[in-house]
Amino acid sequence: MGRPPGVPATVPPPALPLAFLGAAAAGLVACGVTLAWASGASAADPTADPVVAAAHFGMLATLSMGVLGALFQFTPVVTRRPLRSLRLAWITFATWLPASWLLPVGFATRHEVLVEAGGALAALAVAAAVATLSAPLAGRDGDVVAAGIRVAVGGFVVTACFGVVYVADRRAAWFDLPGHVVMAHAAVGLLAWLGLAYVSVAEKLWPMFFLAHVPGPRRAGRIAVTAVPAGVVLLSPGLLTGTAWLAWSGGAVVAIGLAAHLASLVVTLRHRRRAVDLHAAFVATAALSLVAGAALALAGALVLPSDHHAGVALVAASVAALGGWLVEALVGHAHKVVPFVEWSSFRARGISHGPSGRQLMFADLYHHGWATATYVLVTAGIAAACAGLATSEPPVVAAGGSMLAATGVVAGTNFWATARRQGRAAPTAVRGTHVAVAPAGQPAGPSA
């Protein structure tokens, strides 16, 4: 099955999450290129089809692709129960990959047949993902991470249902689809699906990657996992129906949940036993993007009644910042997760030592200089995209898109080239090296 000794049988083979994460890197390239191309249209109308195409490359081909791969990898670890079917997981990949490209390409070129084909494949992918994740998530244990993933998968389904309605309306025009309805859709997808998935999984990943032992119950994490979806339950219907008090109430509850998420990060960093490194920079910068997204959303809501264009521009920038929160986190965590998974793959092939002759370590599986360049590119790209959308400056938006595309190229090439070089340099196993089995709920790793 492609697992080395010591890795629990519940964990899927390395090829599965690596396929999703590799496709996510390609999706980020497409998102950046499309955003640069759509920069002119974004100044006049941030909801124009080219801009919608860029947003869908980001939400579907990049973030959803990466989050699905992460859930297939970590849900069995968290719940200690295997996926229902690896075949269903691969079907998810095989259908979500074309769907996540057909939909934005259809939006950009206005070929409705592509949008409809993408929507049909997306529906099949969602069904396959839910079916295979339902087995490990079936137990009603008290773990906050599993509970959050459970609700996030529900948010994924609701987002897909919203998308089906959107696709149906484009050709038939059965009903009016104004901006506040689209924002109701975006709120569910960004917060109750992608955001909640990260908020939940972070409660497991942060202590592990920062070597942090937080004493006592992690109340902030539990509040975050509870308040974010509870707020979306109010926010999205409020936006959908144009009920201001309901939308504001939901927004306030979501803000409480996101503030608790940030508080959990602060507590984790305070108890860390690992020195501040590049991964910490990714996570902290992602948190700043979250704060910027919330501030831009509030500004947009206040400005919109008096200046429609400026308000819409601010709202578009807030969506970009919230997406940037998750992109920055995804890229940063990939520099931890991909080495974990690749190390497992190398050990399954009998490769236990690095090019230097020493025991193979996670840090050997990516080039640290290129990782720093990736951090600079993704951070600057997100900042430029947000600033350009907020100020309606096409050159700034184009610069942001170009840097995001470069991020996908550099990150993907870094992991691929390093793994390829490692595989060539150490073709045989070295006896006497063993695998240290990590504590329950954590991936295995090389012994010290």
Image (cartoon, rainbow, N blue to C red):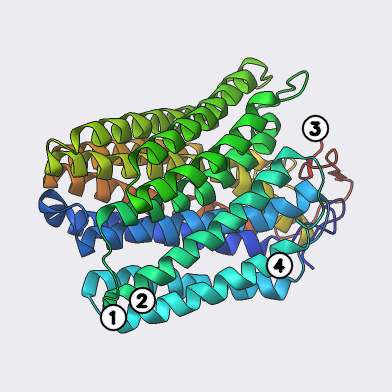
Residue position for label 1: 172
The answer for how far apart the CA atoms under marks 2 and 1 are is 6 Å
Disc 2, disc 4: CB below 8 Å?
A: no
Residue in view at x 72 percent, y 38 percent: 144
Q: Position of residue 6 (x, y in %)?
A: 87, 50
Element class at badge 1: helix
The circle on residue 168 is 2
Residue in view at x 66 percent, y 35 percent: 203
The answer for how far apart the CA atoms under marks 2 and 4 are is 27 Å
Element class at badge 2: helix
Residue position for label 3: 448
Mark 2 or 3: the one toward you: 2
Upstream in sequence: badge 1 or badge 4: 4
Disc 3, disc 4: CB below 8 Å?
A: no
Q: Amino acid at mark 3?
A: Ala
Q: Locate residue 245: give its quadrant.
A: top left
Q: Position of residue 56 (x, y in %)?
A: 36, 60
